Amino acid sequence: MNSGAQSDLPRLSLIIAVYNKPEILRFVLEACKRQLFRDFEVILADDGSGPQVRGVADEYQAAFPLVHLWHEDRGWRKNTIMNQAIREAKSDYLVFIDGDCIPSGNFLLDHWSEREAGRVLLGRRMETSKRWSNSLSLERIRSGEFERIGWREFGESLRGEFFRFEDGIRIPSKLLRQLLLRHVEGMLGCNFSASKKDLEAVNGFDEMYDGPGCGEDSDLQYRLSLIGVRGKSLRNLAIQFHVHHPATKTSQSSWDRFHTVVKPQQKARCEFGLVKNTS
């Protein structure tokens, strides 16, 4: 057994779904430099961005192992590039975020510490205000100031400008989280983690989805449940800040597909995923 070769592999792969927004991606990658958990690689799963994203990726090549995967922009094909990222990942444990979600310093540590066999970890995110998002800078990321959510943000949450304020409070105590009923059951594609072998068992993401809404999270969670992989809540851990932008329109065709996939068929493996045309 070549134990030396194994030790060179990262323990965790952070897969970041990217489509343009290079200035926000720079904030996300800067936040990756602050992670308390250090043994990770970054894989940018790029669904056809312009060359500016490649430029940002190049800036961070020396900060941590980083791979930039790209395919041509031919409409929403996020699940296709995500499957490519799973195939390229060097570790056995994968964390997934979006390129407009900034992780706190404990983000990867929480995912790593809370992992369990037969579980998919379900994180959450804060929906930040336009004012908060416009105030972001590299210095605020580097200093950790962006993590300090206070009375101003609380006031914005009362006015309906800053959503899910309470999900930005990290509560390390499992008992306290249980007492406060801080539990979620649904998967968000922007904040979850799972073992590579479990994702391979369901053939990864279903590439037949052609728009956002459920194919990158609800569908995958449903199929994982069919092989006995249960969700584990990470609410009030793995804190994440979603940068404000106009709401993304949910794809009706994707929801229609999801409703044809669930329960009537009871198929854990999709036909067009990591491997195509499986039975």
Image: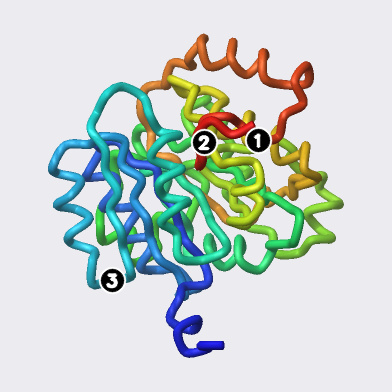
Please indicate, yes or no, whether residue 67 appears anywhere in the rendered image: yes
Q: Which residue is mark 3?
A: 63
Q: Position of residue 141 (x, y in %)?
A: 33, 59
**Nearest the eye: 151 or 262:** 262
User: Are the two marked residues, 3 and 2, in contact with CB atoms closer than 8 angstroms?
Assistant: no
* Label 3 Cα crowd, 10 Å radius (few <14 / some 14-19 / many 20+): few
User: Are the two marked residues, 3 and 1, in contact with CB atoms closer than 8 angstroms?
Assistant: no
Is residue 66 toward the left or the right of residue 233 in the image? left
Amino acid type at image mark 1: Arg
Q: Which residue is mark 2?
A: 273
Q: Which residue is mark 1?
A: 269
Residue occupying the point 50% across, 34% down: 276
Q: Of the two numbered discs 3 and 2 on the same chain, state the one appearing first in sequence.
A: 3
Q: Quadrant of the N terminus?
A: bottom right
Q: Position of residue 39 (x, y in %)?
A: 47, 75
Q: Quadrant of residue 263?
A: top right
Is residue 262 toward the left or the right of residue 148 in the image? right
Depicted 40 relative to depicted 88: above or below: below
* Label 1 Cα crowd, 10 Å radius (few <14 / some 14-19 / many 20+): many
Depicted 257 relative to depicted 25: above or below: above
**Given this view, does label 3 or label 1 mark the residue nearer the observer?**
1
Work out how far the residue at label 1 is from the one at label 2, CA to CA, in angstroms. Answer: 8 Å
Q: Quadrant of the C terminus?
A: top right
Q: Of the two numbered discs 3 and 1 on the same chain, state the one appearing first in sequence.
A: 3
Amino acid type at image mark 3: Ala
Depicted 195 relative to depicted 109: above or below: above
Q: Secondary structure at mark 1?
A: loop
User: Are the two marked residues, 1 and 2, in contact with CB atoms closer than 8 angstroms?
Assistant: yes
Q: Position of residue 122 (x, y in %)?
A: 66, 46
Is residue 52 toward the left or the right of residue 76 in the image? left
